[in-house]
Image (cartoon, coloured by chain):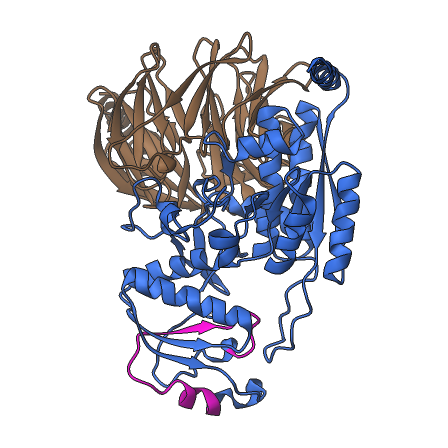
Chain colours: A blue, B brown
Amino acid sequence: MLRTLITITALLLSSVAARASEPLQIEIGYLHYQPERPPALSNILPEPADSGLRGAELAIDDSNTTGRFLKQSYRLQTVRADSPDEVLAGARQLQQQGVELFVANLPAAELLRLSAALGPQALIFNAGSQDDSLRRQSCPTNVLHTAPSRAMLTDALGQWLKARRFERWLLLVGNQPEDQRYAEALERAAQRFGARIVARKAWSFDTDLRRTAQKELPLFTRTDDYDVVLVADERGDFGEYVLYNSWLPRPVAGTQGLTPVAWHRVVEQWGAAQLQSRFDEMAGRWMTGTDYAAWAAVRSIAEAAIQTGANDAATLEHHIRSDRFQLAGFKGRKLSYRRWNGQLRQPIPLVHPRALVSQSPQEGFLHPVTELDTLGFDQPEVHCKL
Amino acid sequence: MKTTTLLKSLSLSLLVAGSGFAATALSSTAVAATAIVSNEKDDTLSLIDLDSLQVTETLPVGQRPRGITLSKDHSKLYICASDSDTVQIMDLKTRQIIAELPSGEDPEQFALHPNDRLLYIANEDDALVTVVDTGDRSVVAQIDVGVEPEGMAVSPDGKWAVNTSETTNMVHWIDTETHQLVDNTLVDQRPRHVEFSKDGNILWASSEIGGTVSVIDVASRQIQHKLSFKIRGVHPDKVQPVGVKLTDDGRYAFIALGPANHVAVVDAKTFEVLDYLLVGRRVWHMAFNEDQSRLLTTNGVSGDVSVIDVDQLKVTKSIKVGRYPWGVVVLP
């Protein structure tokens, strides 16, 4: 007992001394591993290889500018691996060097392995996986999610379709497992917002649609009347070619056409124009949704460090999960984390490649606490024990 | 009243001069007070005649005009043309742009020092405050501040230049003698605008995402009071304070609440919120007319200007202007 007390006093003394003299160091590990994607038919505009990383780097720059005035210094240590084992090994090594804060751009399975490997002393931000089960069933306790879940995205779209009275959906689903999950999220949204799926069709053609879309797709989309075609095709295999090729002249939405996203270059309101131009200048390309999620993760850490003056994961996590936490995220509302599953609440822009169409939650979708919780899993739907 | 006198002198000069040309020239420049509004997405200024409350003229300016301010003698208008990376000077007699100042990149707001010479400009993209001498159009100093500097104010005694940075969430205090940053006050998320009280003892700083206004004691640079707002039927997250205006008699503070579409009326002595006035959509900035009987607000999303009667605390009119009106000043 006495020994514990002594250690605590020593710690307190050292932290006070540190605050007075040298800057507070905040070390953040950035972990990247994404499996090779199978080739897509629509391969003209690939996702940038450093998507996510550059967002985290911008947030480090932003936080260091602030840190100058508060004697805080932020540093990013990056692990980019070609295999799941390598990324885990890299994370363990950072942990041994004392890093407790991580931003992960990993698929769901690897994220769960990472969460178990690093244990409760680590705080991990998920900027790479939209997987619904992470937010609803598996619920790793040391993980916060800055990437929106698929359910948040499809709810955002579902609300808009409802508001526009596009109530009969034709659902086209790709042949990858993540396409199935996106389709499931769309089906959940249909149920929540009272839409009817007139037909669900699985895409299985393997021709190059740049040449034959005009012939294949009208036949493929010939069903009972629908108001809108919804596409579940996350890697962009065939979805880009559904537009203007459906049997009935109808709008296209989902993973292509009108798309719900975490972020996009066309978002410019609420000061976003400034974030976009800072990012463009730094990275020489547009800011992606993954960049935004990684940016929001580092900014969350920095906000908590500014408010608490601490750099340890436990203090920061406590603050971030509390009601006092708020993040200005250029989306017109203050952002905070859901207590029940660690998901960052956020408005979802609905975009087409050249313009913002709308931003959800849509007006009129009400919630007793905050309308932002009409997107994704609300407390009663979640089976997490946090 | 003022207008009548002016009209009389006008007809007099008409008689004396006996020239129709003189009369037209005068009537277009000096008859009624004029409000000047910058339209961010139209690259124009709208001129509103404050007698008829009609837009009388629309003038093209540089790209994305936001902050605007008048020289002390009201002969010149300074315009932050954000996307043209310049501050333009308009001669208000000829309504021509006569010069451009080396403002640094992406100027958003600025404040003119009481000496009528130094302009303090917030460069939003570069985390800088640029000080420009409007006399010889030279850059006097550049001061590093936080990320996305936005609000700017100079204290009435000219001693302090104050800037807010939206992503750093601070009020930065710059000594105008040395042009050094000497202190920072941490405020709530996304501080947008700062306004000194007339006696210079108090600084009001609005935090858009935090939803609060910090009342800061200038001597100690500490927050002495924090205002928050509650409007029936409006979600607290949508209450986003931006512009702040104080009456010279020390009675009221008016706070523009952004997408809450209301202006809060605050007792400037007790800091009690007295009323909320419904204006247009996403209200940004405000300006009084000369005797402070009227307050004009720019409403970004609805593209109009609301006119508030300050004695009655009532909104009396809205005037359609260009797209995304941002700044407003009144030319007496």
Q: Is residue A221 magenta?
A: yes
Q: Quadrant of the N terminus of chain B?
A: top left
Task: Please identify the quarter of the rendering in which residue A304 is found.
Answer: top right
Q: Quadrant of the C terminus of chain B?
A: top left
Whether residue B228 is visible: yes
Residue B18 percent location from the top left of the image: 28, 32
Q: Name which residue lies at 75% across and 19% down.
A: A18
Q: In the image, what residue occupies the spot 49% across and 58% down?
A: A132
The residue sitting at 30% across, 50% down in the picture is A363
Residue A66 on image: x %, y %: 64, 30
Residue B62 visible at all: no
Q: From this viewpoint, which residue is outermost toward the front?
A: A1
Left or right, A277 with respect to A266, comes to right
Q: Which region shows up in magenta? A: A215-238
Q: Vertically, is A296 above or below A112?
A: above
Question: Would residue B21 appear left or right of B8 to someone viewing this image?
Answer: right
Q: Nearer the viewer, residue A140 or B256?
A: A140
Counting every numbered tag in the picture gives 0
B201 up-or-down from B140: above or below: above
- Check if residue B198 falls in the magenta segment: no
Above or below, A351 relative to A341: below
Name the spot of residue A353 as percent of width and height, x first.
Answer: 50, 65
Residue B51 on image: x %, y %: 24, 31
User: Front-most of B107 and B150?
Assistant: B150
Quarter holding residue A193: bottom left
